[in-house]
Image: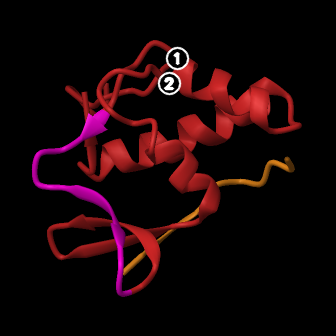
């Protein structure tokens, strides 16, 4: 699988 | 040192969620969420993969090893991205040792 930078959105 | 007592995330670091933080599947939104005091975190698919292994047992190295077997990227790149993400969450108090 392709790796992409993990991101977390914060509310 | 600028931050005495600051938790520095390294390969051997074993992290878990802080007592007041919940990581769970939200049925209403049909997605994984992190519930923290006055904050809602919406992790993307890859972040969920990482956070599901943050259980107070797996070290950062262990988490990265598992991901490196699953994804086609150099381990060093995966380690850097995972460590950055976990360090940010540790700095915010979402994760602890």
Could you give the CA–CA distance between mark 2 and mark 1, rounded to whole angstroms? 5 Å
Verify whether residue B24 appears in magenta.
yes
Q: Residue at image x 80%, y 48%?
A: A3
Residue B2 location (% of width, % of height) = 31, 33
Question: In terms of sequence position, does the residue under pointer 2 or pointer 1 come before the other?
Answer: 1
Instruction: Report helix, strand or loop for mark 2.
Output: helix
Local crowd at mark 2 within 10 Å, few (<14), some, or many (≥20)?
many
Give residue B77's position: percent from left, percent from top.
77, 34
Crowdedness near tag 1: few (<14), some (14–19) or many (≥20) residues, C-alpha within 10 Å: few
Q: Quadrant of the C terminus of chain A?
A: bottom left
As drawn, B79 above or below B91: above
Q: Secondary structure at mark 1?
A: loop
Cβ atoms at labels 2 and 1 below 8 Å apart: yes
> What colour denotes chain A?
orange
- Which of the labelled discs sits on residue B60, or is there none? 2
Most distant residue in the top direction: B12
Residue B92 to residue B36: above or below: above
| Residue at the spot 67% in from the left edge and 34% down from the top edge | B80
The answer to whether A2 appears left or right of B75 in the picture is right
- Which picture quadrant has residue B74? top right
Residue on which the image places disc 1 = B11
Q: Is residue B26 above or below residue B50?
A: below
Magenta stretch bounds: B16-28
Can you tell which chain is drawn red? Answer: B
What subunit carries mark 1? B
Q: Which mark is residue B88?
A: none
Write down the chain letter for disc 2.
B
Q: How many marks?
A: 2
């Amino acid at each position: 699988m392709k790796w992409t930078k993990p991101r977390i959105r914060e509310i | 040192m600028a931050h005495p007592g600051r938790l520095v995330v390294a390969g051997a670091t074993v992290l878990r969620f802080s007592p007041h933080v919940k990581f769970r599947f939200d049925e209403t939104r049909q997605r994984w969420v992190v519930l923290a005091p006055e904050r809602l975190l919406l992790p993307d698919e890859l972040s969920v993969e990482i956070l599901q292994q943050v259980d107070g047992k797996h070290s950062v190295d262990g988490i990265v090893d598992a991901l490196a077997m699953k994804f086609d990227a150099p381990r060093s790149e995966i380690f850097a991205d995972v460590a950055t993400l976990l360090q940010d969450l540790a700095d915010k108090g979402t994760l602890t040792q």
